Image (spheres, rainbow, N blue to C red):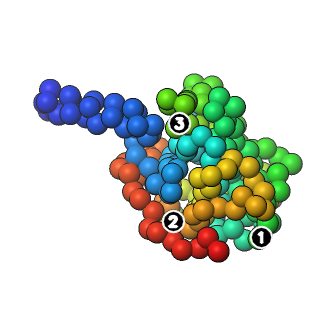
C-alpha cells in the first residue's frame, strides 16, 4: 500500500514538472525540446507529446537514424498561441517537403498548452500504419530508430534555419500503451551542426 507521504511526494514531482513545462511522464530531452510517445491500443494510434520553447522547431523522423531523403518527418513549431505541427518528408540536405497527406491529427482533449509564454506542449496522433507508402509503419514491441532535429533560434524550416542539434535514439514502443520513457533522459551531445 502506498503511504500518504509517497502520494504527496509524487504529486509534488508531477506539479514541479508541469510548472517547468515538462510532460508528466518523462521524455527524451534534445537541446531545448523534449518528446515522448506511446501507443494507444484502443485507437491503434501513436501519440506524440512534444514540449519546446517559443520560436523553436523540433522534427522527428520515425524509422531513420538521420535526415536522409524520403524520411517520414513530423515537425512541431513553437509560435506562441499559433503553435502547430505538420507532416513532412525529408529530402536530404535541404528543407523538408510538406507531405500531401497530413497524417498527424490534433487531439481535442489535449490542446496546445502555453506555459508562461515560454514553453509550449503539443500532442499529436497518427495511425501506426497511415496507408501512405511514403510513411514509416511504426512497429510495436520491437526496436526502431527515431531521428530528431531541433532549432532553438527560429521556428521556420528554411535552408538558413538548419537544426542546432540532430541525432537519433533507439525506441521500443510497447503494445501495452505505456510511454517510451517514464523519466527524463537527456540526449548524448552530438557535434553535427556543420
Instruction: Report the residue marked by disc 1.
Output: 92
Query: In terms of depth relative to the viewer, which is nearer, 102 or 46?
Result: 102
The reply to whether residue 11 is in sight is: yes
Relative to 67, say whether 22 is above or below. Answer: above
Residue 128 in sight here: no
Q: Nearer the viewer, residue 48 or 32?
A: 32
**Residue 168 x %, y %:** 55, 67
Q: Which residue is mark 3?
A: 118
Looking at the rendered structure, the number of numbered marks drawn on it comes to 3
The residue depicted at 14 percent of the width and 26 percent of the height is 4
Pick whichever, 178 or 91, lies toward us.
91
Of labels 1 and 2, earlier in sequence is 1
Residue occupying image coordinates x 79% and y 44%? 102
How far apart in space, not on screen, are marks 1 and 2 (Cα)?
A: 19 Å
Residue 64: which numbered mark, if any? none
Could you tell me which quadrant the N terminus lies in? top left
Amino acid at each position: 500500500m502506498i503511504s500518504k507521504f509517497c502520494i504527496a511526494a509524487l504529486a509534488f514531482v508531477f506539479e514541479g514538472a508541469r510548472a517547468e513545462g515538462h510532460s508528466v511522464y518523462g521524455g527524451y530531452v534534445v537541446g531545448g525540446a523534449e518528446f515522448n510517445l506511446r501507443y494507444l491500443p484502443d485507437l491503434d494510434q501513436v501519440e506524440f507529446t512534444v514540449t519546446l520553447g517559443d520560436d523553436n522547431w523540433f522534427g522527428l523522423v520515425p524509422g531513420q537514424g538521420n535526415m536522409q531523403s524520403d524520411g517520414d518527418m513530423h515537425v512541431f513549431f513553437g509560435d506562441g498561441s499559433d503553435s502547430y505541427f505538420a507532416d513532412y518528408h525529408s529530402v536530404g540536405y535541404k528543407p523538408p517537403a510538406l507531405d500531401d497527406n497530413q497524417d498527424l491529427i490534433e487531439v481535442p482533449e489535449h490542446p496546445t498548452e502555453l506555459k508562461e509564454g515560454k514553453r509550449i506542449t503539443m500532442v499529436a496522433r497518427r495511425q501506426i500504419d497511415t496507408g501512405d507508402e511514403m510513411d514509416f509503419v511504426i512497429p510495436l514491441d520491437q526496436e526502431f530508430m527515431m531521428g530528431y532535429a531541433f532549432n532553438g533560434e527560429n521556428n521556420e524550416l528554411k535552408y538558413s534555419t538548419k537544426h542546432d542539434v540532430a541525432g537519433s535514439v533507439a525506441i521500443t514502443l510497447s503494445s501495452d500503451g505505456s510511454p517510451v520513457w517514464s523519466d527524463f533522459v537527456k540526449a548524448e551531445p552530438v557535434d553535427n551542426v556543420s
